Amino acid sequence: MNFEAVIGLEIHVQMKTKSKMFSSAPVAFSRDPNTNIAPLDMAFPGTMPVVNKQAVINAIRVANALHMTIDHTLYFDRKNYFYSDLPKGFQITQQARPIGKNGYVLVDTPAGKKKIGIERIHMEEDTCKQEHYMDYTLMDYNRAGTPLVEIVSMPDMSNGSEARQYAEAIRNIVLYSGTSDGKMEEGSLRCDTNISIRPIGQKEFGTKVEIKNINSFKNVELAIDYEIKRQAELLLSGQSVRQETRRFDEGSGKTVLMRVKTDAVDYKYFCEPNITPIKLSDKFVEDAIATCPELYDSKLERYLAAGLLPVDAEIILTDPDMAAFFEAGMGDVKNAKDLANFLIVEINAYLNKHAMKIKELPLKPAYLSEIVLMQETGGLSHKQCVSILDKVISDGISPKEAKEELHIEAQVSDTSTIMAFVTDVLNANPQSIADYKAGKDRALGFLVGQVMKASHGKVNAAEVSRCLKEELDKR
């Protein structure tokens, strides 16, 4: 029997705001426990929630990027449950009237683009962080009240690859809209998956299994593909799939049981009485969208139009700071691809070696563009430009000063000068000529190296290769 998977994702995104969703307490990481709190966060009597304006703007921007219908009236609800992660005994959320509905993203499949529907996006507050020990649990309420948006997909995904692409698309939107830093490993983007399988052709869904808090995009794919296989093996052996909550164990590559679900929890939702409905003007919504920073897909399209390969553009766009560095110098070079190559190879190598972020790099984007231009129009080789780059970074001087201190001169591109070296090298290496004629491509590389050696690296390698080919064809 063949099965098909039905997969939906719920993604919680912590928003980058200065204060919390309903209180004035600051939102900040790596602070001492229980220091970023206000009376409202601890449910002190008489405290009242106030909606964070920037959180609303962020949610509108994300909803628009997801092609959603945006509700121009904000309604909030209470989600009641008695657990210690929120002192109030309830969470303020948007159950009945989410800020955005009916959106989609596109993912790549072997059959082409596939539309993954998105049911809703709603705002709510985060819970506290719990640290569990053998016989007690500590509560850190710094996170309690942090603004969240929850993005709930339709059950439109069929495998781990589609789910991974979907999650990455969400991450790119919240990252480039300035809504969140999108770091799964730090918990600012958390992903829960719902997976069931059914015989191909069956309309009814199978029993749903939830996998909680997956911490990387790779693990989203691995966890789903394992779970599909696990459920199929159960059904083929005559067993049934239980409704469970599981987690993904990265070490074993398997999902592990956390708890068995029986009945759905009744949260007894009702309208939040301390926040009256808030009417958003058309201008407020339009301004939130108009002031949204340029999104990932738009940047990717521009980079490809500028001549970058898709893989190179995606590497640069992985980090918004690197994208900003690239764009700062993009208009000053003849070929954006040359600038991208320096960023992806030399700059990334330096950053990795020194465990540094690009914002900490002691190099101005204009200086990197100047070095690229030395290669493009100044007659310098890539190797020479790399030496200049290293000098600029280490000494904090300009490329021109570095070039002078290193006594680097432009390579000779004069054909008559190069041909003199080419003739001498060919006369001294008849076997290499024979190898080239026999179709051994490495012979040309050897001859280029001999010319560069004879000229002490002062001639243009590209011109050497051209002259060698021309002369070899005559012999």
Image (spheres, rainbow, N blue to C red):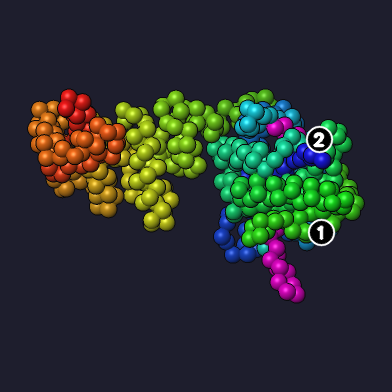
**Placement of the C terminus among the 4 image quadrants:** top left
Q: Residue at x 86, y 33 (%)?
A: 203
Q: Which mark, residue 200?
A: 2
Query: Do the CB atoms of the residues marked 2 and 1 lie less than 8 Å apart?
Result: no
SS of the residue at dot 1? strand
Indicate the position of residue 322 as horizontal and vertical percent values. Answer: 43, 42
At 75% from the left and 75% from the top, the residue drawn is 135
Q: Which sits in the foreground, 277 or 289? A: 289
Q: In this picture, is 229 found above or below 250?
A: above
Magenta stretch holds residue 117: yes
Residue situated furthest bottom in the rendering: 135
Q: Is residue 473 left or right of residue 338?
A: left
Q: Residue 71 appears in which quarter of the rendering?
A: top right
Name the N-terminal-most of marks 2 and 1: 2
Camera sees residue 188: no
**Which SS does the magenta portion mostly show?**
strand
Quarter of the picture holding the N terminus: top right
Confirm whether the magenta stretch covers residue 53. no
Q: Mark yes or no: residue 416 visible.
A: yes
Q: Is residue 127 left or right of residue 259?
A: left
Q: Find the magenta span and give its range.
A: 116-139
Name above or below for residue 133 compared with residue 72: below
**Quick one: 79 or 20, which is closer to the camera?**
79
Q: Amino acid at mark 2?
A: Ile
Rendering coords of residue 239 (x, y %): 87, 52
Q: CA gap, disc 2 to disc 1?
A: 29 Å
In the image, residue 12 lies at what x, y percent?
68, 46
Residue at x-position 29% and y-position 36%: 441
Name the residue that disc number 1 marks: 259
